[in-house]
Image (tube, helix red, strand yellow):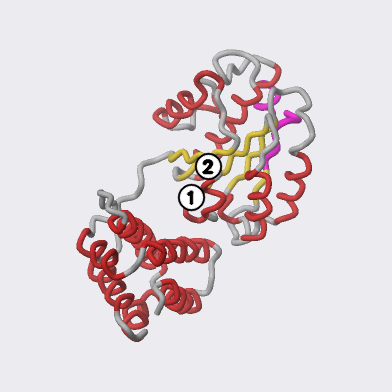
Amino acid sequence: MNQAESSINKEVLNRLSQLLQGGRFPHALILEGGAGQEKTEAALFLARAAVCTGEPKPCGRCPGCRKALASSHPDIYVAGGGTAARSFHVEAIRFIRSDAYIKPNEAPRKVYVLLEAQTMSEQAQNALLKILEEPPENVLFLLTVPSASALLATVRSRSQLLALEAPQQAHADAALVNAVVDGLCAPGECELLFSTAPLVRDKETLRLLLADLILLFRDAGIRRAGGPGCLSGQPEAAARLASSFSRDRLMALLETAQAAVRWQSQNANAALLVTALCSKLRAAAGK
């Protein structure tokens, strides 16, 4: 293991190595979770493997590996907007879209490493989606994110997901989750507004609630379709949602919760976010 690989967790390194067996590369890969530096190193490890001409990949000895380690390989493009919301601008994606159709200079493929992709604006993600839908040959996109749910569902659906760590087990208080479910099922809007009001001052609880709602709406949709499983750990709430809403309504609720995760990752005003969330959840529920 070289110095550049030493910061990658051994288990993660094993997963990456298994992904590379037989030289198989997806056209787009989302690296989710893990510390920021670990995600970056994992993405760069895969980028080196993608331009490597030796074995095993990355061999660390071929000209491609040496240039990649020196950050001078002409077929590896690294972009990122930092950590601020919407700091990953659409202009960078537009450049990638035009550059990706130019053949690699010397490697088997071109690699585009998009760091902290959750900071892409929705406009930038939609611009990226256009090339993910019909990717050129010999191109690899590597996106790093704390959570894939911060990306548009359409971007996620056209990429392979690789989790760098086990999902966090923290959850919102069950009473809060049930209060939100009660509010969704109630005929008026007051109950939902009342149950979510404290979230304006508690961003972490809002984050946990959104994560739980995503799982809960998923569970309810599967239950509605007659399938098993309960990732949310709240079978009664999932059953109540499944009996109260159609599958299409549950999918709309799921998409609304996923959108709210993106809004929060972009540092949306908390009061406006919670108000918009309540309004859009009720609209998705047909209320």
Residue 206 lies, with reference to residue 182, above or below; the image says above
Q: Where is residue 217 in the image (x, y as percent from the top left)?
A: 35, 61
Say which residue appears at 52% left-offset and 18% top-offset. 22
Q: Which amino acid does label 2 sit on?
A: Ile
Callout 2–callout 1 Cβ contact below 8 Å: yes
Q: Which residue shows up at 40% across the image and 67% down it?
A: 249
Query: Is residue 200 visible in the rendered structure shown here?
Result: no
Q: How many numbered circles are shown? A: 2
Residue 179 place in picture, x, y as percent = 27, 74
Choose top left, top right, bottom left or bottom right for residue 187. bottom left
Relative to 184, does residue 43 appear above or below in the rendering? above
Q: What element carries label 1?
A: helix
Q: Residues within 10 Å of mark 1 (few under 14, many from 20)?
A: many
Amino acid found under the numbered disc labelled 1: Ala
Q: Distance between the residues labelled 2 and 1?
A: 7 Å
Point 55% across, 52% down: residue: 154
Task: Please tell me which of labels 2 and 1 falls first in the chain.
Answer: 2
Residue 198 sits above or below residue 56 on the image: below
Q: Does the magenta stretch include residue 74?
A: yes
Q: Residue furthest left?
A: 236
- The residue shown at (33%, 83%) is 194
Magenta segment includes 182: no
Q: Where is residue 13 in the image (x, y as percent from the top left)?
A: 46, 28
Residue interval drawn in magenta: 66-78
In the rendering, which numbered label is found on residue 148?
A: 1
**Picture quarter with the C terminus:** bottom left
Frontmost residue, 247 versus 191: 247
Q: Which mark is residue 30?
A: 2
What SS does tag 2 mark?
Answer: strand
Relative depth, front residue between 136 and 163: 136
Q: Is 41 in front, or is 236? A: 236
Considering depth in this image, is 161 or 157 the residue closer to the camera? 157
